[in-house]
Each structure stands twice: as C-alpha cells, then as structure tokens.
Image (cartoon, rainbow, N blue to C red):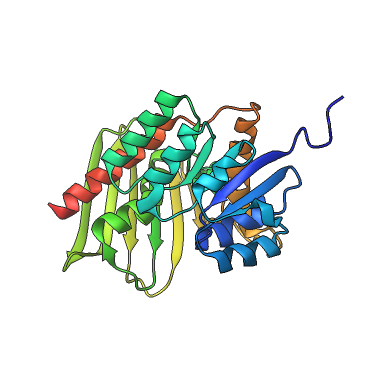
Amino acid sequence: MGSMDDDVLAVAVVGLGGIARNAYLPVLGTRADLRLRLMTRDRAKLDALGDAYRVPAECRFTEMDALLGEAPLQAAFVHVATVAHVEVVTRLLDAGVPTYVDKPLADTLAGSRALVAHAERTGTPLMVGFNRRHAPAYVAAARAPRETVILQKNEADAPGAVRDVVFDDFIHVADTLRFLAPGEVSDVAVSGRVEDGMLEHVALTLAGPGFTCFGAMNRRAGAKSERLQLIGDGHQREVRDLADGPTGWTPVGRVKGIEQICEHFLAAVRGETQFPDLQDALATHELCEQVVERLDG
C-alpha cells in the first residue's frame, strides 16, 4: 500500500518576483498536494516567502545546482526575468523536469524556437503560461458566437522599448486574439506609435473568412484596464478586467485563470490530461515577432 506522500509532487518555484508573489504562490502555496521548493538569489526575499508559506529551510535555494542536486523534482514553475528564461528553462529541461514558464518563452523568436526545439529533443514537457486561455469569462467567450472580437489592454503610463512591451505584455493580447479567432487567420495588420524608441500604443488585427479580431494596447491610457467585446449572431457580450460580471468573493487567481492553468499543468504532470500544443504557443511568439518587425520597420 502506498504512503501518504505518494500523491504529493515536489514542485520548484524558480524566481520570486511580483508575478510569483502576487499570482502563483497564493495558488500553489495553499495546495496540500505539493511540496514546494523555492529559489531566488535574494536570501531575504527567499526566507520571507519561505516563512510565509511554511516552506522548510532545506527546501529554500539560492542556486540552481543546489536545487537540482536535491531529491528529484517532479515539476517547476519559472518566473525569473524574461532575459533569463532560456538559461533557466534549458537547465530544467536537461534535468528532465516538466516545466511551466511564465510568458514569453524568450524575448526573441530565435530564443523561443530554441527552447521549443530543446523540449522536443529532450522529451521533457514544457508549457507556456497563457492564463487568459483558462480564465472562465474568456473560456465562455470562446464558446459564444463572434464575428467581431475587440480586446483592449491598457496601462496607466508605461511606454517601453518595443520588443519588451510586445513580448512581455502585448503577447497576452496577441495570444487571446488567436485563442478567440473563430477560424483560420488569413490577414494580419499592425499599427502603432513609437516615439524615441518607446512604444506608446499598438494595434493588431487578425482577420479571416467572416470574422475580424482587433486588439489594442495604449501605454498612456491614464489607468490600467482590460476590456473584451464580442459581437456575433445578433448578440453582444462584454467582459471587463477578465470578469464576466460581479465576482464577489471569488479569488482573483480563479478569475484570471491562474488556478485553472496551474491545475492543468499539474494534472498533465500526473498524466491525467495532455500538455497544450507547444507549437501553438510558438505560433503566438511568431506573431509577436511580426508585430515587433513592423513597428521597428
């Protein structure tokens, strides 16, 4: 008869910045079926979060060699800075650790392709964190009639370098449009405004037979917001800030699809479901590279 720990997964969270602290640890740190191992080079942050989530001292690491030198990991969530994704994810894949990486795979198409190829070569599962595909309101939107899709994702005042903004943030818009497109995309259009190398706003249109999907981001909108509109079959649907109406006491992680995407990844690690198509995730990165090229051109 198996022990009580047979169903408990040893899972690493590598990188403890804002996305890990605010989105993932509140979900992963409350699951009884996980034994967390935390890694960051910042010892003070490591100990503070280790204490908060009751992670034993021996499960806190500041170096990858030490993390991988312990008992085998069964899964890892990577939330380090984008520039470090290729190095960190490659180490985990080489060690045979199924890996979830916060979008993007890398900040270049070449780096993204290299990681996908490495995952396929090693046979180690790799999943990209496109949480909006799991947000309940957007899952419902994907089932609704939609001849026209309009998605706006804005920031208060945060213009940035074109590649950084497109791959670190606008990628959510690009991927969500691909997710909601009701057919094969035949036309792609990009426009935007770049001042002194800084992206102020960008728009992307994906069109195909009988449908148009339009996504826009303004980095000087005065307030942070997200709004999705669907029109089809004589009906309209609107979702604001990923919520399809009042959310009451529903946890933010559930509204944004963080709980659900974590569950999907962990279920796939356990062999209970399939990992998402990695080539499909790569297609979103290819689209983002197109956006960067057209804006920089």
* Residue 171 vertical position relative to residue 249 in the rendered view, above or below: above
Q: Given the current orientation, which residue lies at the most extreme right position?
A: 1
Residue at position x 64%, y 41% in the image: 263
Residue at position x 64%, y 34% in the image: 267
Say left or right for 90 vs 12. Answer: left
Residue at position x 37%, y 54% in the image: 168
Residue 166 position within the rendered picture, expressed as x and y whole percent measured from the top left: 31, 54
Residue 268 seen in the figure? yes
Quadrant of the rendering where the N terminus is positioned? top right
Along the line of sight, which residue is nearer the eye, 107 or 228?
A: 107
Question: How many numbered discs, if any?
Answer: 0
* Residue 72 vertical position relative to residue 136 in the rendered view, above or below: above
Along the line of sight, which residue is nearer the eye, 207 or 179?
A: 179
Residue at position x 46%, y 44% in the image: 234
Residue 180 position within the rendered picture, expressed as x and y whole percent measured from the top left: 43, 40
Q: Locate residue 218: give its quadrant.
A: bottom left
Say left or right for 241 vs 216. Answer: right
Residue 143 seen in the figure? no
Residue 42 position within the rendered picture, expressed as x and y whole percent measured from the top left: 51, 64
Say left or right for 173 vs 31. Answer: left
Say left or right for 282 vs 69. Answer: left
Along the line of sight, which residue is nearer the eye, 146 or 58?
A: 58
